[in-house]
Amino acid sequence: MSAVTWKTRGTLAALALLGTTLTAQSEVVCEERNFDGLRYTACDIDPRTDDLRLFLDAPSGDRFGQFSAIDAELKTEGRRLSVAMNGGMYHDDRAPVGHYIENGQEVMRVIPTAGPGNFGLLPNGVFCIQQGRADVIETLRYEAARPDCRHATQSGPMLVIDGNLHPRFLEDGTSRYIRNGVGTSEDGTRVVFAISDAPVTFHEFGRIFRDDLDLPQALFLDGRVSRLHAPGLNRSDFGRWMGPILGVVETVEP
């Protein structure tokens, strides 16, 4: 199942790659995996200990847009990204299509209605980061409950809802793209970023979260522009400029 594992704490090989000493504040595991003959990469995050955040605008007011821009800003604080991926769909100006909260400030309201494209393929959902936990929540449930999210991003469609694949996914679907998403455990203590390393259908990608990673809730973040930053795997994808970015921040000691 797993070909490569990287831990940011207690792994000498990873420390040698980075050339620095990392604080023992968190542990992020990234794995290259195979499931049903499909290759993908998954990163396991614990929101109780890992500093999981969303990023959109730099202090200058410009969109960050690239992992390197976030790292450059964090470097001024003695920190860095340990793992990151694009965090939801965006408009031409790279503003979030749906609901977005960063550091407790709402940037974009919830969009509860159906619409064109993947985002509007209901049910869609919200990835909500709270103190000590994080959850993928179907949008109407989220709107009814209004949890106290420190960070939140809305995207769609949902991949897995209460252990079931999205009802519109077809097992014999033919639309294949590189896709990325996020899944969460029932108790909110496990978050997994996943990205396909080859084009997959929605049905195949949903099954990765449900049947391989054993996560009851999962949310599609994007396709075509899907990107992953995982320095421990010697990987930092570059391409089109991004809108919202999800990442885990860690402190670096010289």
Image (tube, rainbow, N blue to C red):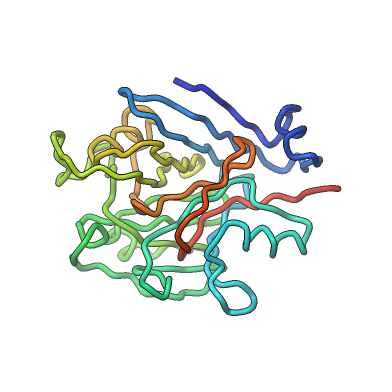
Q: Which one is nearer the viewer's eye here, 173 or 211?
A: 173
Q: Which one is nearer the viewer's eye here, 83 or 126?
A: 83
Which residue is at a point 15% across and 46% down the rendered structure image? 168
Residue at far bottom of view: 61
* For residue 163, side relative to residue 68 (left or right): left
Q: Work out whether 65 lies above or below 26.
A: below
Picture coordinates of residue 60 (x, y %)?
A: 63, 78
Residue at far right of view: 254
Which residue is at a point 83% across and 48% down the rendered structure image? 253
Q: Work out whether 113 lies above or below 24.
A: below
* For residue 41, side relative to residue 73 (left or right): left
Quadrant the N terminus occupies:
top left
Which residue is at a point 27% across and 60% down the rendered structure image? 119
Q: Work out whether 75 lies above or below 4.
A: below
Picture coordinates of residue 248 (x, y %)?
A: 60, 50
* For residue 12, side relative to residue 190 (left or right): right
Picture coordinates of residue 103 (x, y %)?
A: 57, 68
The mark tally for this picture is: 0
Picture coordinates of residue 186 (x, y %)?
A: 40, 40
Which residue is at a point 46% across and 49% down the rendered structure image? 227
Residue at far front of view: 239
Q: Work out whether 189 lies above or below 99.
A: above
